[in-house]
Amino acid sequence: MVRVVRLLAPALLLLALACQPQAPAPVYGPWEEGLTLAYEDPTLPQPQRAQDRLQVRVAKATMAPGQPRLVQLDLTSIRGAMTAKVQHQGGGQALLGEDDHVLSQLLPLGFPTTSVWTERGTEFRVVGRATWSGAALLPRTADPIGIWVEAKPDKGPRRRTLYLPNFGEVESIEERGTQWVTVNRLVAQGYTDLPAIKRR
């Protein structure tokens, strides 16, 4: 009997560990209602840089556990405004059309474990993890470690984007000759209303 208990003990321990509640997988995009992000292209001179600033606001979010999570984003600039709907599921991120069909798979299912994929003729690969140099802009509770993703189109320069949990894109760099140049960067964040939901 003692021998049986000794043999079963490791298996029972593994089973107990497997049954522990798992932390939800990070969402590599903005999802809290009211969260507003502002982006600028640092290569542009002022005042054009400020004039071309893009504001992204989470207008509405449905983050039910175990289901596709839908987020409505309002994008505004001095040139106008538009609305985008994004679906988060299994680490993936898809841009949806008006009838909720997938227009583009921004991040693949299983991201970041899925490290290589192709979308509309562009090859993507996960480059690696890194701490964002602009993390002082974020709340103290935010995770400053993100994932760099490289996009290699059929034509044109390679581009790398750093995605942070709960914020998504915070910086994009583009290959120009022998250098990588920042072409899009998060420069402000905050809430235009109080957040309506809390993620569990």
Image (cartoon, helix red, strand yellow):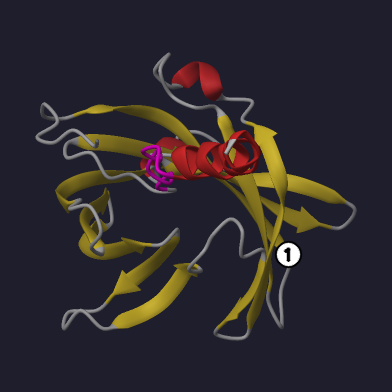
Queried whether the magenta region covers residue 162, the answer comes back as no
How many marks the image carries: the answer is 1
Circle 1 — which element? Answer: loop
Q: Which residues are magenta?
A: 19-27
Name the residue nearer the viewer: 9 or 51: 9
Image location (x, y in percent) of residue 110: 52, 63
Q: Amino acid at mark 1?
A: Arg
Residue 43 in view? no
Image location (x, y in percent) of residue 186: 47, 36
Residue 194 in view? yes
Q: Is residue 78 left or right of residue 151?
A: left
Are there few (<14), some (14-19), or many (20+) residues within 10 Å of tag 1?
some
Judge whether 116 appears above or below 167 on screen: below
> Which residue lies most toward the front here?
1
Judge whether 100 appears above or below 66 on screen: below
Q: Is residue 96 left or right of residue 176?
A: left
**In this figure, which residue is indicated by the disc labeled 1?**
158
Name the residue nearer the viewer: 173 or 103: 103
Judge whether 156 appears above or below 172 on screen: below
The secondary structure that dominates the magenta segment is loop
The N terminus: image quadrant: top right
Residue under the point 68% across and 41% down? 129
Residue under the point 24% across and 35% down? 200
Locate residue 102: give its quadrant: bottom left
Queried whether the magenta region covers residue 21, the answer comes back as yes
Image location (x, y in percent) of residue 115: 67, 63
